[in-house]
Amino acid sequence: MRKTQAAKKRANSIFGITSMANVAHNDVEEDRASEEPYFAEKILPNGDYYTGQWHDNFPDGQGKYLWTDGCIYIGEWRKGKTMGRGRFTWPSGASYEGEFKTGYMDGTGVYIGANGDTYKGQWVMNLKHGHGLMHYSNGDAYDGEWRRGLQEGHGKYQWKNGNYYVGEWKNGVIFGKGTFVWSNGNKYDGFWEDGLPKGNGTYQWPGGSFYVGNWSKDPDEQNGTYYPSESSSTADLKWDPTSVYNDLASCKICHGERVSIMPSQKRLAMWYSTKGVDRPRRLSVDGRASVGIERPLDKTSLWENDGDGSSLREPRRDFDYELYDDTNPKFNLGLALKVPKLGKRQGETISKGHRNYELMLNLQLGIRHSVGRPAPATGFDLKASAFDPKEKIWTRFPPEGSKYTPPHQSCEFRWKDYCPVVFRTLRKLFKVDPADYMISICGNDALRELSSPGKSGSFFYLTNDDRYMIKTMKKSETKVFLRMLSAYYNHCRSFENTLVIKYYGLHSVKLTGPAQKKVRFIIMGNLLRSNYTIHRRFDLKGSSLGRITDKPESELDNTTILKDLDLNFIFKLQKSWFQEFCWQIDRDCEFLEQERTMDYSLLVGLHFREMSPNGELIPCETPHEHCSWASIKLGTNMQARVERTIRKPELELQLVGERTGECYEVVMFFGIIDILQDYDITKKLEHAYKSIQYDPTSISAVDPKQYSRRFRDFIFKVFAEDTCSF
């Protein structure tokens, strides 16, 4: 049976339609695309069926859409998106009836699950969000506030057995202040954490006895007093608070059934006319285009005869690759990998007349003053006072000079050194020669400003010898770093091979006069400085949302920073180095997790050793030793191999491609950068907002513990032990 005939049959049974408009007549309807909406009945190229108002090649107005998998939407449309009131049903029997917005369940609506779960309340972008009442199929019920699909805020949960809880929730669990009442009349009123009593609380019996104290699942932390009623027996005096935790173990929170596919993820088959030729392109109902055109699954081919009867076979899916770049070797194994073209030297030299010329002069004057200032010798054991955020030195730099500062041609400014003893000791710990440090930053050669500010709005400057990078800092970042400075110092001191970026100084410049402009900046090492040409650069986080370069392959050069979804290699380290790498990544991530930071990434630079005259990379069979071991350090000058991977174009968010066995010899450089993003209210709001729109596991802004776990999981997938001996 042809797919269009099957779709027609299904449509007739569901909608009662006995006649169809032939899609082949689209060339006639094309002339009507710019007119007012009109009624149309269409069998779409992939077998989907639509009947209703149509305008400009999209459903627009009231309409019914039937997907080949059995999903149905009946309701209002606006330019191809479900918008307004409507009803969406799943093949499982689940349904949602209510408000839609740009393809999402959004507004007030009722969801009835296939298992009988029923939710009536508010929605935001497919998730329960706001006030809602949930009746679970097992007899439990919840009436209260929701956030991002989970109970959060104030709410009441009633168990089928008569127990109930009224109080605060967080991330789907009891958390905060609340009261739990058992069906026998016993009651706990107090604080909770992760679904269990934690902190101050009172447990009461119907007879009047009560227990007051500090609650904890750990018996050693429990502390309280039992107050018996007049009718209590002496046996009650031996009551153990641990019994409450045993009683609560059976009171599980029901999470309901998981929705297999959201309405916003359903794709529509539409037409875009190009020079009179209809070209199908798939759109999701929220308006996003698909990378490729997925051919509909032909269910009649699931059963095929092998001569001795029918056998179940794996359904075959064909893909039209017209809409993805088949000239990209990331997808096409038949294309040889090439060394990218060499880009021009990064950054614009800050010469006289540049908008930041005076700022550069101020910075160089301040650094020269800080590094050259006499200071008593100190060991590595620093006093706690050295890390105090108030430990700073202000110095005034008038143009005419002073007792401590030289005359200069810039305007008057004030220079601040944050925790100068700590950073002087860090430079000594990192084996930085003071004279070389001063010459690199404050020598005759000017700094270079990168062409555009980073995502955070910070500006970056490079020293002429590429040894150091200077980044402007927001006040919030400065506070985070000063807060974690002691832990950072101890971590770097404890782990000589830490991959965390090295910081050498924290300063600020404040201009005097009406402007009162204050610029904070930090000085750090440039991880990818090398005598080797760095051919490829990757910034890796382990998230997928927005983690792809927007340049085509032909426009990439060796200075382009590629991201997670651009990665087409597995990095292979010799056994001992791989073991040390894994161990150090664990230690570094534990440190960052403890300091509540997130959004950091692993910066990786690759130098390819072997290439042909036309720039094609030459694969190697076995690795060869090129470097002297004395010059190799974890993350620096590392002799390694990379194995090419291939991505499937139909898997748009595939983080790790499939291995090909094709290896190339490289010199690697890597380290952890951008460690100063605190999981503050801004990032929490970003997480909440993006979690509503996208898969929460795909976004960068997540809780530090989750971020650390996801980062490590990804890094340990793209790094591997090289089983070949060097």
Image (cartoon, rainbow, N blue to C red):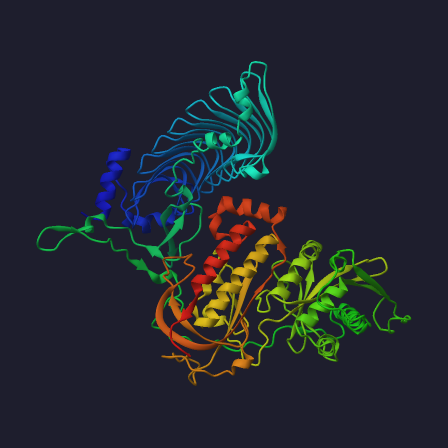
* Extreme residue toward the front, this view: 234
Q: Is residue 541 above or below residue 356?
A: above
Q: Is residue 609 above or below residue 581?
A: below
Can you tell which quarter of the image residue 279 is in? bottom left
Q: Is residue 396 left or right of residue 56?
A: right
Residue 154 in view (yes/no): yes
Q: Is residue 371 left or right of residue 110?
A: right
Residue 213 in view (yes/no): no
Residue drawn at the location 49% of the way across and 23% of the way down: 182
Using the image as rendered, state which of residue 702 and residue 518 is in the foreground. Answer: 702
Where residue 640 appears, x then y in whole percent? 46, 75
* Extreme residue toward the bottom, this view: 613
Q: Is residue 274 left or right of residue 190?
A: left
Where residue 553 appears, x then y in whole percent? 46, 69
Using the image as rendered, state which of residue 90 and residue 114 is in the foreground. Answer: 114
Where residue 318 appears, x then y in whole percent? 28, 57
Q: Is residue 47 above or below residue 576?
A: above
Where residue 254 appears, x then y in whole percent? 42, 33
Q: Is residue 201 left or right of residue 666?
A: right
Numbered label tally: 0
Looking at the rendering, in which quadrant would you find the C terminus?
bottom left
* Extreme residue toward the top, this view: 231
Can you tell which quarter of the image residue 474 is in? bottom right
